[in-house]
Image: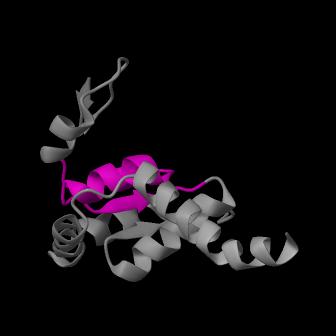
Amino acid sequence: MTTLGVAVAAEPVDMVRLLRQADICVANGPGTALAALQAGVPVLMLPTQLENFLFALALRRKGVGAVIHPDQASPDFAGALADLLAGDKYAAGARAFAERYPDTTVGTIAEQVVARIEALTAGHQEGRA
């Protein structure tokens, strides 16, 4: 169903195909946000957990999205959406992100984090043996 340019689906959708047609993406976590960014689509983050909020702040710092603070009493959704759609700033940032990180997924990020933690703790572990 589409109303005022907003589509709502009752069934799972092909995100890659859908995002190719999108101007922005509204997400609450990194999986959908990264898919959007890889499609060159800026993101409005509505995080509900601390980790997702920190991720959203990083996206805002990179200039590829905006964030609505989860504790904000009267969030300005319309203003945030208008800001994302105004000009080409966020879209250009998202396209640059897509070019720079074409193969980044939540899974590859998790693998990198685990590898880094293992590398950092390797010396500590050896000292205990």
Q: Is residue 110 above or below residue 100?
A: above
Q: Which of the 4 image quadrants contains residue 101? A: bottom left
**Residue at x-position 49% and y-position 56%:** 111
Query: Residue 41, position in %: x, y?
Result: 22, 58
Residue projecting furthest to the bottom: 61
Q: Say whether residue 64 is left or right of residue 2.
A: right
Residue projecting furthest to the front: 129
Q: Is residue 70 shown to the viewer in this render? A: no
Query: Residue 46, position in %: x, y?
Result: 52, 55
Q: Which of the 4 image quadrants contains residue 19? A: top left
**Residue at x-position 16% and y-position 74%:** 92
Question: Could you tell me which quadrant the C terminus lies in?
Answer: bottom right
The region drawn magenta spans 22-47
Q: Is residue 83 above or below residue 52?
A: below
Foreground residue, 126 or 12?
126
Question: Could you tell me which quadrant the N terminus lies in?
Answer: top left
**Residue at x-position 29% and y-position 68%:** 84
Query: Residue 90, position in %: x, y?
Result: 24, 73
Q: Say whether residue 56 is left or right of residue 39.
A: right
Foreground residue, 59 or 7?
59
Q: Can residue 74 be found in the magenta stretch?
A: no
Residue projecting furthest to the right: 128
